[in-house]
Image: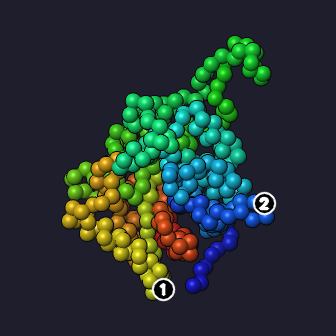
Amino acid sequence: MTQRIALTGPGPRPDLNLGILAFVDHAGIAARDGRVRSRGLAEGFALFELAELLGYDVGYVRTRHLQRYLSSPLPFLAALGQHVRRMRLGTQVIPLRFENAGRLAEDLATTDLLLEGRLRAGVGPGYSARDAINVRAFGIPEGGVREHVDRTLTGLLAFLDGETVSLADTHVETADPGAPLQVQPQVPGLRERLSYGAATVRGAGLAGTLGLGLQLTTMHPDDGSGRPVDELQAELIHAYREACQIGGLGDGHVSVGRLALPIRTDADRELFDGLITEDGWHRRARQEGLLEREIGGGPAVFAPVPVDDPAGVAAALQADRAVAAADELVLSLPMDRPIDLVRRIVVTFAQDVAPLLRTRR
């Protein structure tokens, strides 16, 4: 299967940012010659290097605990940043239910320094149908998950803003006794580059009030109204923009994720057959009330997956109300699929769909 990969850098910067969101796994761990390597992590590196060559603006990784996918994304991004030199790198999202605000602030700031200011970290509550599965590894959140998430977010932002957390005593070698201490390092601009993954109007408004970016993905809680995902998310974007403006923070920054399957040839359609079948099942389940996926114990709805020639895919995305209201469109790549399939989506979207989106925008 031939791939047309442009090895030159991107042209003039468009007004619509484009990114990818990938599952990177730890699969294929093996020891050889005194070193331990992971085939999955190496494939992840190669995927983002390809995305940079193709002109994507930003690359995100997902975070998953107790699974084979990245459980600690920041070390991966720090290492990736030594190979990917232009593209911004980030997370969607780091689940705050598992985090300590002080340690997370340190890790974010150190990673941002290693990336020379290119970190675009997303944080959020995260979700699980059953929180009990996380207790042994991560403990029970004090006051419950929601209270812990809100407390962690408040602390994280305060620490990134440079809050004095203590005063030095005689055991702090680098400061005089009584000098104010902050969580270190303090990195200019990091706070303004943080985003929040919201799934409710409350969460979207909170992100806008706090001056954070807003991240939306392909899955959304079902509110029982029967409305499609793009309409539900457009409502969140409106609440977010309104909160930003009330706070004198401008329009903020909105990122929307969508999976799309642009088809050039019959071979593409055959390659994507499993994904097409899965999307059809989700649509039928939605219509028949048989949704099997959950967010926080409740039913979820999915954004439809455009399956068409590149022009048809571009038109479908242009008609998506959430995408039309966003600043950044992120190509959400599938999980548990061969790397050749994932690469094919990334290449075809960049070469055949992205120019249409940017032109029509």
Q: Nearer the viewer, residue 309 or 180?
A: 180
Tell me the distance, in whole angstroms, between the alpha carbons under discs 2 and 1: 42 Å
Q: Position of residue 250 (x, y in %)?
A: 47, 39
Q: Position of residue 325 (x, y in %)?
A: 40, 54
Q: Amino acid at mark 1?
A: Ala
Point 47% across, 59% down: residue = 329
At label 2, the amino acid type is: Gly
* Count of numbered badges drawn on the protein: 2
Q: Earlier in the sequence, mark 2 or mark 1?
A: 2
**Camera-side residue of 338 and 137:** 137
- Residue at the image point whose x is 57% and y is 57% from the top: 59
Residue ID for mark 2: 34
Vertical arrangement, residue 106 with respect to residue 46, above or below: above
The N terminus - image quarter: bottom right
Q: Is residue 159 depicted above or below 214 in this figure? A: above
Does residue 212 show up?
Answer: no
In the image, residue 222 sits, relative to residue 12, either above or below, namely above
The circle drawn on residue 267 is 1
Secondary structure under badge 1?
Answer: helix
Q: Toward the viewer: 132 or 198?
A: 132
Which residue is located at x 39 percent, y 65 percent? 318
List x then y, in percent, for residue 65: 50, 50
| Disc 2, SS | loop
- The quarter in which the C terminus is drawn is bottom left
- Residue closest to the eye, 125 or 129: 129
Whether the residues at callouts 2 and 1 have beta carbons within 8 Å, the answer is no
Mark 2 Cα shell of 10 Å, populated few (<14), some (14-19), many (≥20) = few
| Percent coordinates x, y for residue 21 in the rendering | 52, 59
| Residue at x-position 77% and y-position 23% | 174
Q: Is residue 167 left or right of residue 340?
A: right
